[in-house]
Amino acid sequence: MRRLEGKRVVLLAATLVCVFITSSCSPTALAQTVQNPAKETSDCAGCKDDGMDRLIDTMNRLVEKRNAHELRLRSLNNEADRQRRSGEFPPIEEELEELVVLESECRGEHAGCLAVVHLCGLASSYSGTERPVHRALDKVLEHFHEYGHLREVVLGFERLVAHDGMKTLPALTCLIDSKQTSPFVRESARLCRARWQLEMVANRVMFESYLGSLAAPADIARVKEDLKAKFPSVEEAEQWKRAAISELDELAAASTEHHLMVAKAVDPKGIVLTEDSEQTNQSPSIAGVAKGVSFRAKYLAVGSECPALEVKLVNGDHWSLREQNGKLVIVQFSFNGCGPCERMYPVLRDVVRDHPNKVSVLSVMADADVGTTQEAVTAGKMTWTVTWDGRSGPIATEWDVRNFPTVFIFGTDRKLLFRGAIPEGYLAEVVKALLTQDLK
């Protein structure tokens, strides 16, 4: 890594690492939005009798072929061959076409809906936009709005925009505008759209800042091309931000009782997903999540002054973010059993040991039971300030934390320097650089 030359480059580098590294986990798997209690169609009544059986069979064969393909690549003895063939697409075209046919034959029904959902998931797992899986999804996208009356369609929302948000946003908007879309699906889609738009605006700002740190003409040209192809224009970004915050504030003020969906598998191999109603009953509301996303956009943008955060620690003391005067502050969202979270603990222990007067660390724990958090502190697993927030707790909800670990770093001037995921080794480098006098 080239020598870091300032706070901006340090945090930009960290951000860019985290854009392309997914090393996070969630205590509630695969949360998406759904209404509760249910009033819309959710079971297989009305579907063709063999629709779900065909879906499960197709997806199981597809996954088996994909796993076998990956195993063959890993078994290659020659490293050059492995590198050369690493981008090969697995031989699953037949199964992809079966999913397209299934959607056509079960259009507007449960099996057709889940065929679209799983095509969205498959498309988002492969880079590019022209692979067979992307072409298969393109064939069904124009019918996406025909599933607005089925709650499980929300399982495809975030996967849809993750595939290619700029391209697929019209399909999501069409579903929002469709008269047959149920209230909870519409609210869910609006939440997903607003979230994605704000993420794109933030990523554009990050890429623009990164552009200013480049010197090589080829690198500058590449980033400029990415900005043009993958992000809204400057004018569009500002419009998106205003519209997204307005939409989120409307959702936050709604009196409906729609909740986030938690998914579960319907087949023994855990491949085909549908709603877990029991877990959905315990999930946060759309209104609460919308409030958190809006809060994060308004008060947790990089460069913003830290928001008010006052918590009771597990040892009974009280802690205030705004009272950490003159210190670098790290707020880590974590839970026991989260591998990436716990790999960060040795780094945090070293930081608070080596810089007790310069750095303040707070871990916000999402353990289901406060006793689990207390045991970890008592055992010396965490030697810094710790508060318990609970599963889908109020702090994580207000700060719009969806993955763990999520880290927020505030400078000595109380302004936010970084937010997101960060590899534990790079966190140590970032903290060291920020504490180095010549970087101030």
Image (cartoon, helix red, strand yellow):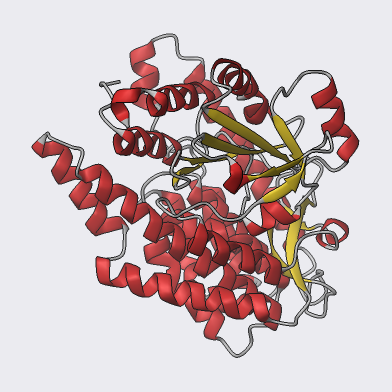
Q: How many marks?
A: 0
Residue 387 seen from this side: yes
Instruction: Assign the C terminus to one quadrant of the image.
Output: top left
Q: Position of residue 72 (x, y in %)?
A: 51, 22
Q: Nearer the viewer, residue 68 or 320?
A: 320
Q: Residue at the spot x=40%, y=34% of the render? A: 14
Residue drawn at point x = 64 percent, y = 23 percent:
345
Between 358 and 174, which is closer to the camera in this rendering?
358
In this rendered view, identify the residue nearer to me: 23 or 431: 431
Image: 385 above or below 222? above
Quarter of the image containing the N terminus? top left
Residue farthest to the top, as pictured: 77
In the image, residue 327 above or below residue 271? above
* Front-most of residues 432 and 161: 432
Task: Identify the image quadrant of residue 377.
Answer: top right
Give coordinates of residue 367: x percent, y percent: 80, 40
Outermost bottom residue: 179
